[in-house]
């Protein structure tokens, strides 16, 4: 819980989402979705997500698109993360 309460940890994970290695980006997504799904987000974490919502959604829409056709769980989790981001408000 402490890890996902830290805004600096969120920023680090967001940077890792853009790493050149597809393995690193996929693992970063696994952590990122916990930040997004946390119902008790710290105000700083929520502000970062809300402020970057449009860019994050646009990026995630194309994120590992090739994997969506063969990995139903990934497709569902990615869709849920996008929907959750789109519904965030301060």
Image: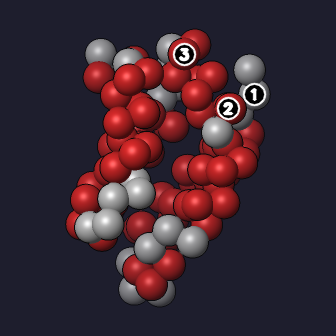
Helix, strand or loop under label 1: loop
Proximity of marks 1 and 2: CB atoms separated by less than 8 Å: yes
Q: Which mark is residue 89?
A: 1
**Viewer-nearest residue: 42 or 39:** 42
Circle 1 residues within 10 Å: few <14, some 14–19, many ≥20: few
Where is residue 90? Give x, y as percent: 74, 20
Q: Residue at x 67, y 42 (%)?
A: 53
Is residue 79 visible from the viewing direction of this image? no
Query: Which residue is found at the position 51% from the left and 37% from the top?
Result: 36
Residue 27 in view in this figure: yes
Name which of mark 2 and mark 3 comes first in the sequence. Answer: 3
Q: Residue at x 32, y 66 (%)?
A: 20
Q: Secondary structure at mark 3?
A: helix
Tell me the quadrant of the picture where the N terminus can be found: top left
Examine the image and state in which quarter residue 2 appears.
top left
Give percent across and percent down for residue 51. Answer: 68, 32
Where does the image place residue 77, in percent across and percent down from the top left? 48, 58
**In the image, which disc is placed on residue 50?**
2
> With respect to residue 20, does 33 lie above or below?
above
Q: Residue 73: horizontal and vertical position, in percent?
A: 41, 68
Give left or right: position of 65 versus 30. Answer: right
């Amino acid at each position: 819980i402490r890890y996902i309460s830290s805004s600096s940890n969120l920023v680090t994970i967001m940077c890792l989402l853009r790493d050149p290695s597809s393995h690193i980006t996929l693992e970063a997504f696994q952590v990122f979705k916990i930040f997004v799904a946390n119902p008790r987000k710290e105000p700083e974490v929520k502000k970062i997500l809300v402020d970057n919502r449009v860019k994050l959604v646009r990026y995630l829409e194309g994120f590992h698109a090739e994997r969506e056709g063969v990995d139903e769980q990934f497709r569902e989790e990615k869709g849920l993360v996008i929907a959750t981001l789109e519904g965030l408000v301060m």
